[in-house]
Image (cartoon, rainbow, N blue to C red):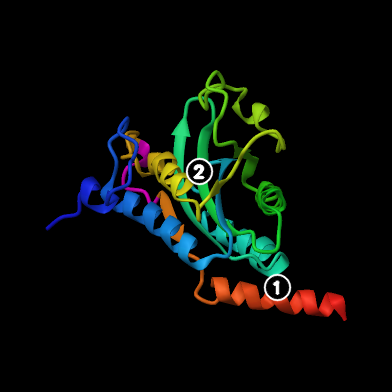
Amino acid sequence: MPKTVKSVAKDYTYNTTYTLDARRLESIIKVLETSKDNLNKPQVAHIVLQVESIEFDKSLINTTLNTVLEKNLDTGYGYYIAMEKSEYSGYHVHIMLTFSTGSKYAFTVLNEAVTALYELDDVKTAIALPRKTDRSVSIDTRDYYTAFKKLNTDNNYFHILSDEAQFNDAVHRYSYLAKDETKEELKGRRLTQSKTPKAYKTKQGQKIRKIKIDLKDCA
């Protein structure tokens, strides 16, 4: 029996403004659920990269995040990536980024990720989007990347995935990234990728590492 949006959505509320792809929605929910279960103090945030062309190598995103989050910050993470195109933004990549905040501030993790991604050669702009954005600033305007260029501590960028209401809201918000492709030039291209947190980045593993760090600091 083929998968449908309704069957993969379970009991979650999802975006009904667009026609969604069932397999994409399933991937988004899997990343969020796995992150909730496996990461210590899990959160999710939204990053958008403006890139040069459709040929942008999306594997660079994982390479970059692996270096800055896993190796440098010792933070587990997951993601769902979707490439789109709009009139003024051109080609751009949405990143639903999940991560652990067991021993780091959420703003620290998000800022490090955005900064590192912006340094990639084919990335023109990298921004983080607040949970509630100014609806007068559309992605189809030239002001979009200017409006959200800097992280503003007055904004709430994060959904706490261990909170049921916020988790459900995250599913609804990010289900937008499962929409069917409407532009002919993008159809048939591999525009999405997903990654669930690695097994060794479990809650227990992160607690052990944090305890070891605390003990060393006290010695």
Pick out the residue farthest to the right.
Answer: 219
Q: Secondary structure at mark 2?
A: strand
Residue 12 locus on image (x, y percent): 32, 46
| Amino acid of disc 2 | His
Give the mark, 2 or 1, whose residue is nearer the N terminus: 2
Whether residue 201 is visible to the viewer of this picture, yes or no, is no
Q: Nearer the viewer, residue 17 or 159?
A: 159
- The secondary structure that dominates the magenta segment is loop
Name the residue carrying label 2: 94
Q: Residue at x 52, y 27 (%)?
A: 139
Q: How far, Cα to Cα, is label 2 from label 1?
A: 31 Å
Height in image: 74 above or below 5? below
* Residue lying at 56% horizontally and 41% vertically, measured from the top left: 48
The quarter of the image holding the N terminus is: bottom left
Figure quadrant of the C terminus: bottom right
- In the displayed structure image, the side of residue 197 where residue 9 appears, left or right: left
16 above or below 162?
Answer: above
What number is the disc on residue 210? Answer: 1
Asked if residue 160 is positioned above or below residue 213 in the image, the reply reads above
Q: Depth check: 64 or 135 in front? A: 135
Q: Where does the magenta region start and end? A: 185-190
Q: Which structural element holds mark 1? A: helix
Q: Position of residue 102 (x, y in %)?
A: 65, 63
Q: Residue 73, located in which quarter of the rendered image?
A: bottom right
